[in-house]
Image (tube, rainbow, N blue to C red):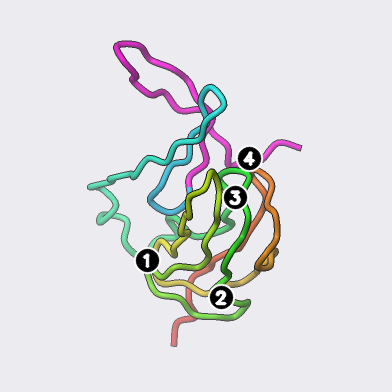
Amino acid sequence: MANSNIQIVQIQLENKTINVPAIRSGDKLWCHYQGQNFCLELSNPSKKKRAGSNLDLGPMYAPMPAKLVRLNVKEGDLVKAKQVLMVLEAMKMEYSISAPKDAKVSKVAVSAGEQLKDSQFLIELIEQDKK
């Protein structure tokens, strides 16, 4: 079954436009091209206009096959923006997955030491309860 969070994006590369599969995780876009994975940092100046929306919350998926070396949260935890939720290891490098904004961890579907598949569901973030 295909992951609905995979999208096709156009990237300008050496005077040509290519279409590549990509997964967004927070402010990063993980792309796959010719057998390699690339991480692009996203910049969105209009994001401030949508403050308080559910933008960036919801399920998060593994951007590539990797080993989950550290899981720093559990279900029910409240997290702050940019807090590292987990650390993945792939291609001899570590990749941190951080919270895109203040949120609550509603579901954790993985555990430390687990070998992850590409696009595997990892964690879900929801709005923090308002008091």
Mark linked to residue 73: 2
Q: Secondary structure at mark 2?
A: loop
Q: Residues within 10 Å of mark 3 (few under 14, many from 20)?
A: many
User: Percent x, y for residue 64?
Assistant: 58, 43
- Quadrant location of residue 113? bottom right
> Marks 2 and 1, Cα distance to the nearest angstrom?
13 Å
User: Residue shown at 69%/46% (left/top)?
Assistant: 117
Q: Earlier in the sequence, mark 1 or mark 4?
A: 4
Q: Which residues are magenta?
A: 1-24
Q: Earlier in the sequence, mark 3 or mark 2?
A: 3
Q: Is residue 69 above or below residue 4?
A: below
User: Residue shown at 53%/22% (left/top)?
Assistant: 34
User: Percent x, y for residue 107?
Assistant: 65, 69
- Asked if residue 21 is among those painted magenta in the image, a careful observer would answer yes
Q: Secondary structure at mark 3?
A: loop
Q: Which quarter of the figure is the N terminus placed in?
A: top right
Q: Which residue is mark 4?
A: 4
Q: What's the magenta bit mostly, secondary-structure-wise?
A: strand
Q: Secondary structure at mark 1?
A: loop
> Marks 1 and 4, Cα distance to the nearest angstrom?
24 Å
Please, which residue is most extreme toward the front here?
Answer: 92
